[in-house]
Image (tube, rainbow, N blue to C red):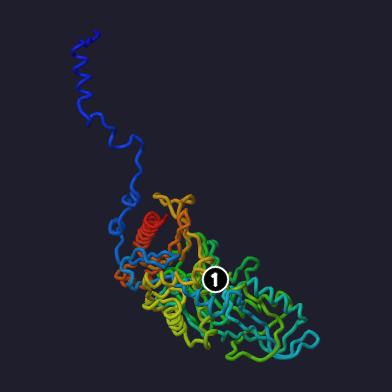
Amino acid sequence: MVQTVSRRSFFTLLAAFSAGPALAAPPAVSLRPQLRPGGLHKQAVPGVEALLRGSGLSGQIGFAVADTKTGKVLETHVETLGLPPASVTKSITAMYALEKLGPEHRFQTRLIATGPVVNGVLKGDLVLAGGGDPSLDTDGLADMARQLKAAGVHEVSGTFKVWAGALPYTKMIDSDQPDHAGYNPAICGVALNYNRVHFEWRRAGSGWGVTMDARSARYRPEVAVAKMAVKNRQLPVYTYEQRGGTDLWTVASGALGNGGARWLPVRRPEKYAGDVFRTLARAHGIVLKRETVAATLPAGNTLVSHDSPALRDILREMLKYSTNLTAEMVGMAATGAAGGKPATLQASAGAMSRWAKTRLGMASSDFVDHSGLGGTSRMSAADMVAALNTPLAKQQLKPLLKQITLRHDDGKPNKAHPLHVVAKTGTLNFASCLAGYVTDKNGTELAFAILTADQPRRNKLSKSERERPEGGRSWNRKSKRLQQKLLERWGAMYGV
C-alpha cells in the first residue's frame, strides 16, 4: 500500500518546519566528536581509602610518594608512623657504605708470615687475616692456597692462626630468630660462604647419610667445625649447641624424608674459615697445624692477598639477594671508616641512624642493625621518601636497585606493564615493605615508600614459629597486591 500526501497537507508540513528563527538556527553543539575534559581518566582511579579497605590487610599501613624533580610530596597516609622497615634498611646501609667507604672500595683478606721463608719452609706462623670481606667463598680461599704454594711455601714450622678482629664478633644478627635460620649467622672480621655450612642428607638403608661441607662452585670440602646427628624424633626439627668451638646440631628423623639439603648458620666464622683453608692447603701439599684464633693482628709480611669485588658490585648483589651478612659487615665497616671500630652491632646501627638523620633527613628513624632483620627497628614512610630524594640516593643508590616486575591480576608477571619500578623489598613475619622509584612510560619519576605491618600478630609468634608462621604467606600476598595497586594509582594520578 502506498500512502499519498495531498497538496494542502504538504504545504502545512513545510510551514511547520520553517515556522521560526529558532528552528532555522545551526546546531548548538558541533556534530564533530567533543574533547573530553582534562583529567577525566583520573576520576576512574580508585581512591586511597577504597584501596586500603579492599586490601583485606590487617595491621597498619603508612606510605608517601613524591616527585623526584621537584621534591613535592604528592600523597601520604600516616606517613610519620614508625614501622619495621625489614630489608628496606639495606638501602640506607648501601648509601652509608657508599659515602663512608667509596664505591670502589675493596676488602682484603691476607696470608701473613711472621717469619722468613727459607728453602720453602716458613720459619714462623702463618696468619689468615680477615679484612671484613662479606663475599669471600671457598673458591677464593682455594685461590689463596694455590698462591701460597706459588709463593714458594711448602711447609710451616710455626702455628696457623686466624685473625678476625677487623669487626666485632656477634654471635647472631637477631636473637629472636630460630637457631637454624641460615640468614642469621654470626659476624666477625672474616666470613666464608656468608657464614653458612651446607647440610645434605640422603637415605642410606634404614637410616640417612649426612654431610656438612663448605661447598662453592668448584669445591666441596667437608668441615670439622660443624657436625650433624640424626635423632629418632618428630620435633623439634633441629637442636643446636656449641661445644669447644664446634657447632653441634641434631635433626629429627621424622623431618628428613628421602633426602634434601639446606644451609645452616655458622657461629664461629673464624674457625670455619681456618678449618676450610687447612683442607685446601693440604690439597697443595702444605700441612698446617690446627687453627688457633689470634686476639691481635700479628706483625709480619703479606705473602698472599685476595681482594673482594668493588663495593658497588657487592652492594648490587646485596640489594638483589637481600643478604643479611653483607649488610651487617659493610655497615660496620662503614662505621669503622667514619671514626673507629664499633664495639657492637647495635652501636654501629646507632651510628648509622645518626648519620641518616643528618645526611638524609630521616628525623624519626631508628635502626638496631644494618640488615633490617631485627624487628625493633623503626622507620617512617616520610623519612624514606626524604632519603630517596637526596642526590646520594638518586645518583648512587638508584642504579644499584633491583627491577621489580609488576603482575597481572592472576599473579603472573606482567613484563609489558607500563610502569617501571626499581626498589628494595622488605619482608618479615607480618611486615612487608617496598621503597624506591616508579617511572611511567612518559618518563615521569616518583619516589615512594610503602610500609605495612601487623604488630600484634608479630608479637604473638614464638621463636619456633618465626620461620613459617600460620597465615604469614597470605598476609604477605595481600600486602604486595596493595603495593602494586598504590603504584598504579600514582602512575595514573601523577604521571604525564
Q: Residue 493 location in percent, x, y? A: 37, 56
Q: Residues within 10 Å of mark 1 (few under 14, many from 20)?
A: many
433 relative to 34, above or below: below
Q: Pointer 1: what residue?
A: 315
Under circle 1, the secondary element is: helix
Task: Work out which quarter of the rendered image holds the C terminus and state it.
Answer: bottom left
Residue with the most extreme right position? 119
In the displayed structure, would residue 235 be above or below residue 170?
above
**Who is closer to the viewer here, 266 or 28?**
28
Image quadrant holding the N terminus, namely top left
Asked if residue 447 lies left or right of residue 286, the reply is: left
Amino acid type of the residue tagged 1 in the rendering: Leu
Answer above or below: position of 123 versus 437: below
| Residue 41 x, y percent position in the rendering | 35, 49
Does residue 234 appear in the picture of this structure?
no
- State the residue in front, 183 or 8: 8
Spot occupied by residue 287 in the image (x, y as percentages of width and height): 70, 81
- In the picture, measured across the screen, residue 434 lies left or right of residue 305, that is left
Name of the residue lying farthest toward the top = 1
Q: Nearer the viewer, residue 32 or 276?
A: 32
